[in-house]
Amino acid sequence: MTTQYKNPLIYLPVEIKAREFHGKLLFALFAAEAGYDVIIGKQKEVRDKLPGMPPGIYVDKSTARSKEKWFTRFRRLGNKLVAWDEEGLVIQEEQYIKSRFSEKSFDHLEKFFAWGPTQAEVICKEYVPAEEKTVLAGNPRFDMLRPEVRGFYAAGAQRLRVEHGRIILFNTNFGFFNHFRGKEKAKEIFMKSSTHKGEQFIVDWIDYQEDLFKYFTEMIPWLSDSFPDHSIIVRPHPSESIEGWEKEVGGFSNVKVIQQGSVLEWISAADLMIHSNCTTGIEAFLLGVPSIAYRPVLSEKYETKFPNDVSTNIYSLVELQKVINDIIIQGNTNKYTESDVLKQTASRYISNIDGPLSCETIIEHINGIMPPCLSLGGRVVRWGQILFDRLNQIRQRYVKNRKNHIDHVKYDEQKFPHLRREEVDECLHTYQNVLQRFSKVQVQNLGGTCYMIYSKK
């Protein structure tokens, strides 16, 4: 089928499928209704398609220093750039600025969509010119937690309950120590991508996570023995080694290590959730599920404030056992989930808790951005960039170390498993039923994991 692009284009790459896809697809549906053709898919595949596609608005996931060269290339292809930061909600100010923010990257943007006041203040304090481009918008991922949208996960949560029974969910966040490619490789990766104070900062972070990892694995036998009728679901972070967890918990019949599926379905299906410095603590709070921040090791340098602020903080195994018994056996969930103070805390970090959806706010601000009509000089630059990109792709095929390439492909596939047409269609139909809109929105596969979402006239 020949694809005709009659509307302005939005390019919407997805890095981690389980984390981002549903929220970004929801954004794509709103954008299609607003008159855009949206190209959504695996980040690398969307990037690879750009040289052969018309200019559009590219939505990136951060403004880190690593984006500087990419952003320059995208703009040479005639695109306009906007961004939000998928990892910009749970932040430590100094670390965030060093590892997730670049003035050069930010200067390429037309708009930056901040999670809320806290992130915006951190950025604008560091770089005053950012104020003109920064919009308090929340994030489409958290639109999924709103009462009017969360029905999207109802059927999936019910399937999980039928399959696994009652669930105690343990969301892990040990990507430095228990990395997919090993902690030494993790150190190398984070040293290259980070502008922290030096190697010791990363080494200490790995050591901190290693200490926490031991405490978390020590709780598993008690959970398994105390709640034999529950499934204890260990859900590793996408960057973590599944095998590392399976070695620790493989001897317990009711403990399962599962990384597949949306975390919001798992949270919705759970009786309670346990985490460590993880965004899922915030998601559980907004979904009304008891959330425990287990903190047997304390660190001002490496702990994250917001998830702990909206969770029940526990510092020892004895205290943990008491609270879990109170929730599971006594059924006292309300005192762990309902608090006006916690809602006020959350509003400092998230701007789309109520009012317009994040998707609506972002599209409102994108509407004023139009890709340029390239001059003759601009077209020459564009074709020069296309030729450079093609030659670079050919070079990379031949210079890659085979083992490292295979490891990278496996890691990449763990972060973004294949996206089938049936899966996209099922999500579209669920959104149509839950929100009673998007009836004219259509889906077209462009090859691989890339799909065009558009509205039929």
Image (spheres, rainbow, N blue to C red):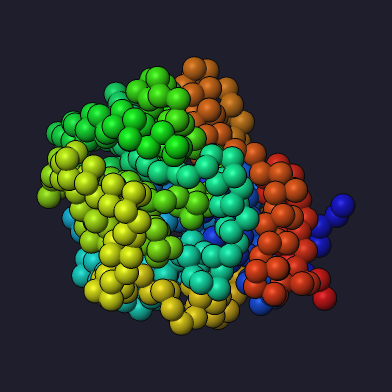
Residue 84: quadrant of the picture: bottom left
Q: Quick check: 441 left or right of 72?
A: right
Q: Total marks drawn?
A: 0
State the residue at coordinates (33%, 41%). 173
State the residue at coordinates (75%, 48%). 422
Q: Look at the image and tell me whether residue 431 can be seen.
A: yes
Q: Return the x and y of residue 54 as percentages of the image width and height.
A: 69, 60
Q: Nearer the viewer, residue 397 or 26?
A: 26
Extreme residue in the front direction: 330
Residue 429: quadrant of the picture: bottom right
State the residue at coordinates (25%, 29%). 218
Q: Quick check: 56 left or right of 238?
A: right
Give the answer, above or below, for where 136 lies relative to 173: below
Q: Return the x and y of residue 188 as percentages of the image width and height.
A: 30, 29
Extreme residue in the right direction: 1
Residue 342: quadrant of the picture: bottom left
